[in-house]
Amino acid sequence: QVQLVESGGGVVRTGGSLDLSCASALVIDAFDIWGWYRQTPGGQREAVASVTMAGVENYADFVKGRFTIKRDKWRNTVDLRMSSLEPEDTGVYYCTGRYRSRDFWGQGTQVTVSS
């Protein structure tokens, strides 16, 4: 079983920034693709951003220009850098990684944006 652990969630005011990290015991380059999802209150889990092993990034329209996904090989983490946060960004953020054709998920980290 591959464990993924998110960190960096918290409470921030509208317009603020927050950095999330996803750590794995395996080297991050062993994964084919990494992603961040979120589940907003009363909503379904939705894709936020992804990055492939080749470094191709993809973003949901509602975060383009505000969020950045990066693989940090030195820290062996996959980070989600969030800026210009809005109350609508409130939710539990999950990282996911595909390793040997299986998708693994973290437990999630809470992000709360206050107005």
Image: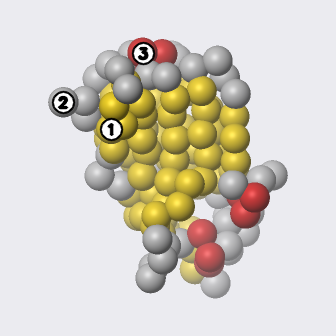
Residue that numbered label 1 is attached to: 104
Which badge, 1 or 2, comes first in the chain's sequence? 2
* Direction from residue 108 to residue 77 in the image, left or right: right
Location of the C terminus by quadrant is: bottom right
Which badge, 3 or 2, comes first in the chain's sequence? 2
Residue type at numbered disc 3: Ala
Pinpoint residue 8: horizontal percent, then vertical percent: 45, 50
Up-down: is 32 above or below 108? above
Which badge, 1 or 3, comes first in the chain's sequence? 3
Residue type at numbered disc 2: Gln
When asked about the image quadrant of residue 41, the answer is: bottom left
Secondary structure state at the residue bearing disc 1:
strand
Pinpoint residue 29: horizontal percent, then vertical percent: 48, 16
- The answer to whether one can see residue 76 in this image is no
How far, Cα to Cα, is label 3 from label 2?
14 Å
Secondary structure state at the residue bearing disc 3:
helix
State how the image is colored.
Answer: secondary structure
Residue that numbered label 3 is attached to: 30
Q: Residue at x 45, y 57 (%)?
A: 93
Counting other residues with Cα less than 10 Å from the Cα at mark 1, is it few (<14), some (14-19), or many (20 or more)? some
- The answer to whether one can see residue 31 in this image is yes
How far, Cα to Cα, is label 1 from label 3?
13 Å
Residue type at numbered disc 1: Phe
How far, Cα to Cα, is label 1 from label 2?
8 Å
Residue that numbered label 2 is attached to: 1
* Direction from residue 37 to residue 63 in the image, left or right: right
Disc 1 to disc 2: CB gap under 8 Å? yes
Up-down: is 50 above or below 87? above
Up-down: is 47 above or below 87? above
